[in-house]
Image (cartoon, rainbow, N blue to C red):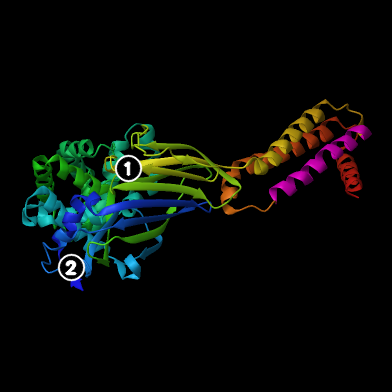
Amino acid sequence: MIDLSEEWNLTFELLDDTQIWRERAVHEILLRDSDHVDATTAYQIRIPLELIRRYAPGAQVTDQMRLLLPFAARPKSLLLNFDLAGAEGKHASLVLKRDSALIQAGYMSHVDGRPIGDQPVGGALWAGVSDYTPWAWREHYVGREKQSQRLRLLGRDREWREEALANYLNADLELGINAHHVARWQHQTEDARRALIEALGEGEDAESSSEWILLAIPFMPIRPRGIADIDILVAEFCDAVDSMSLRARRSLAELGRRWHVIIDTVVPVDRPCTVKLSEQRPWRGAPSPYLRQEIEVGDASTTHIEIRASDHGVVLDRLRVDDFAGHRVDVKVSDDARETADAIALYADAGTPPGVVRVGLRARPRRGYRRPIWWLQSLIAMAGTTMLCLPVTFAYLVESLALLTFPLTLAGAVVLSRESTSLAERLLRRSRTLLMASIAALWVVALSRLLLHADVGWAESAWVWARDTISIIG
């Protein structure tokens, strides 16, 4: 076996042009429960022999090779139910986050064309940008939104962010940083931030550690020891971005938003094989039926995307492929996109430019799930209208209200207790809530008519109501 796991330059060359060795990408997304989707990404790869021979001159097609393989880019979020399957059943393991950050800092130096020692803080800043995860920042900013309501109402969100950033930095560094320091550093880095946003072309991201470089400082392997050190760091960052090429800026901007899944694995030399990653991704926005997922296209010669629902009682429609500004993307397809009731498939050919798109669609229950709720809500509406028009004669009023209220309540209980999958439960949540509210409103109308228009006291009215309702049940 050829061991090239220490050859980071090989990993860098693989990142430079992924279409050379990624022959096919297959993205499968399965809608199975109410809070997560099962996502599987499989790449058919073939690493060219001529590339391997630059690092192992005696390599042959029959050889097995161990290397650090840049598998895919992922948003900076927690991996759930993560699983890797290596080529031909071979070993595959995820490189530790801190080691991956160092590799990606080295790649930034490779793209920038300057030695790692000439990078800000000897590359430690880029390692911090890569190692950063948004959870700690959200705790100081998003997690304390209630405290910021007054400032937000006054249009002073910028002041709140500066104060939150100062608290975020002091939580790890304890350097006595205040909002005035943060405001000064953000003013210094504003031009560099704009340059990175323009290079990537995905709009602003309030949680990006490259656009908001102060977010990366607590994750650096070498941390500042004083405010003067941060002054130097900020100045080096601005100079570095100013001297970068467009490609380097794009790489740095993406590094702040996503991380490369780098795996230590064994693959055959110059032979096709498949490496697969499976995970669970959050389906945010419950109970919204709209699913949106970030998918990288153009990073392989061909890209296949398939989205399916595990529940045959769910229909998928309204497919959209958008960029980060919400504009529809013209994804080139060699064949028309295949759309069925429970599956949608897309095929992007080699002419698709590399980038990340947002694939969105709507999931909705079939009519067989929705019709009973619609019919029952219609009946409840008609019954409520009838109750308001009933004559005030006491005996007739009580019997009529009981006859209208109880059967519809019983039917509603049956519909609400109908067994359904977790996925269908998410999609029907609003309809079920509306049905429960309709039943409650029906009872309010009935009791109001009974108590306001009966000829006797409320106690006797309630007794007659209960007696007639029991008689109807019997």
The amino acid sitting under disc 1 is Asp
Location of the N terminus by quadrant is bottom left
Q: Which residue is mark 2?
A: 60
What SS does tag 2 mark?
loop
In the image, residue 311 above or below residue 262: above
Residue farthest right in this picture: 395
Checking the image for residue 332, the label placed there is none
Q: Is residue 281 left or right of residue 120?
A: right
In the image, residue 111 above or below residue 393: below
- The main secondary structure of the magenta stretch is helix
Q: Is residue 66 left or right of residue 290?
A: left
The amino acid sitting under disc 2 is Gln
Given residues 54 and 155, the one toward you in this image is 54
Q: Earlier in the sequence, mark 2 or mark 1?
A: 2
Marks 2 and 1 close (CB-CB < 8 Å): no
Q: Which residue is mark 1?
A: 349
In the image, residue 128 above or below residue 457: below
**Residue 270: percent from the left, percent from the top?**
22, 61
Rendered residue at 28%/44% (across/down): 163
Q: Is residue 287 visible?
A: yes
Q: Is residue 267 magenta?
A: no
**Residue 450: percent from the left, percent from the top?**
84, 35
Q: Is residue 431 left or right of residue 205?
A: right
Q: Is residue 403 magenta?
A: yes
**Residue 160: percent from the left, percent from the top?**
31, 41
In front: mark 2 or mark 1?
2
What SS does tag 1 mark?
loop
> Which region shows up in magenta?
395-417
Given residues 190 and 22, the one toward you in this image is 22
Graded by Cα atoms within 10 Å as few (under 14), some (14 to 19) or many (20 or more), the crowding at tag 2 reads: some
Q: Is residue 209 visible?
A: no
